[in-house]
Image (cartoon, rainbow, N blue to C red):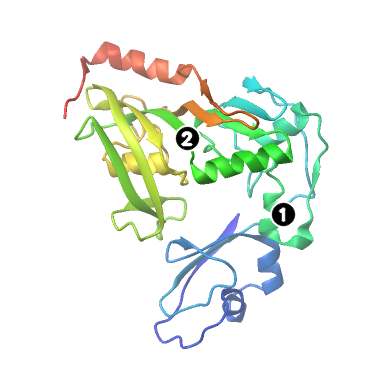
Amino acid sequence: MAGFSIKVPEDYSGAERLDKYVASLPDGMNRSKLKAGLCSITVNGRNQKISYKVKPRDEIYIQWEDNVPDDIEPENIPLDIIFENDDVLVINKKQGMVTHPAAGNWSGTLVNALLYYLGRQKIHQDKTSGGQEALVRCRPGIVHRLDKDTSGIIITAKNRDAEEFLSREFKSHRGIVKEYICICQGRPQFSTGIIKTGMIRDVRDRQRFKAVEELSQGKLAVSVYKCIACYGDYSLMKVRIKTGRTHQIRVHMRYLNCPVLGDPIYSKGDRLFPKATLMLHSRYLKIKLPGSNEPAVFKTETPERFKKVLAVLHKKYSKTILSD
């Protein structure tokens, strides 16, 4: 994936569309090329459209992908299926699997595996519709996502009606409960709490997001946490998210000064667990399914990587239960 940053001068006096402004720069990009491969645009940390009117002092960051593949192929990748009916598949996603094809990850994804499992044909990409539209077509049945290195429960739709139903449920948050467990570096100040912040992209590092106390900045992010137990300077946490922002739990745990162990973006290396991978797992989902009046509940077992880390912590430290 390619990308570049632009800082609009203070003395800029125009009101051009963003794509026209970029094309006018000495090192800019042709408008048709930009539209064909566009992945994302942020202005001052917020997502914007290509039609955005540029203003003085704007900080613009653009990511694009030159080579959207012609086809997304079915791939014979084993799936850990928790539940299946005519409308949905509930899967325990393994750590390391990308949810849907996107720039830099065109194969080996959950979508590739679903196409094969459901006996479907490859997805032909209509590149004439523009990069972002082409990428959306790579995601049939995907109504929410997990980060690549987050394991656990993800629900997918098997038909268009189910996809529309689940998309509405996730958008409205009606009765949906999504709960995660994570092992963190550090101890929270309180055993339970609600984290309510704005979330913006970090202009100094485009892979990162930041929690900001000003709720009007970026997108609202709300997480409810409970510290299950502490072991020395490590904490086992349970987190329920009320919103579904990218990296939300990872950012909010860092905001608590308790970054998730093994997080390559938001935490530092750990001397006790130098080879730890991201210790974040989606363990519980409560959601209404198409055609049902009562919500369904899905759970997973604690992953093996958690058990190994907890065995070391149990041996080395006494278990402590925090009190507010």
Residue at 50% x, 28% y is 286
Tag 1: amino acid = Ala
Residue corresponding to mark 1: 134
- Report if residue 100 is visible in the image: no
Which residue reaches farthest right? 121
Which residue reaches farthest left? 324
* Residue 107 lies in quadrant: top right
Q: Earlier in the sequence, mark 1 or mark 2?
A: 1
Residue at 66% x, 23% y is 79
* Residue 294 lies in quadrant: top right
Q: Position of residue 316 (x, y in %)?
A: 25, 14
Q: For this view, does 180 lie left or right of residue 79?
A: left
Residue 53 vertical position relative to residue 1 in the rendered view, above or below? below
At numbered mark 2, what does the secondary structure look like: helix, strand or loop? Answer: loop
Which residue reaches farthest front? 293
- Report if residue 157 is visible in the image: yes
Counting labels gives 2
* Mark drawn on residue 175: 2
Q: For this view, does 262 lie left or right of residue 41?
A: left
Tag 2: amino acid = Gly
Q: Residues within 10 Å of mark 1 (few under 14, many from 20)?
A: many
What separation in Å lies between label 1 and label 2 (alpha carbons)? 32 Å
At numbered mark 1, what does the secondary structure look like: helix, strand or loop? Answer: helix
* Residue 29 lies in quadrant: bottom right
Q: Position of residue 78 (x, y in %)?
A: 68, 22
Nearer to the camera, 160 or 53: 160
Residue at 53% x, 22% y is 298
Q: Quadrant of the N terminus?
A: bottom right
Q: Nearer the viewer, mark 1 or mark 2?
A: 2
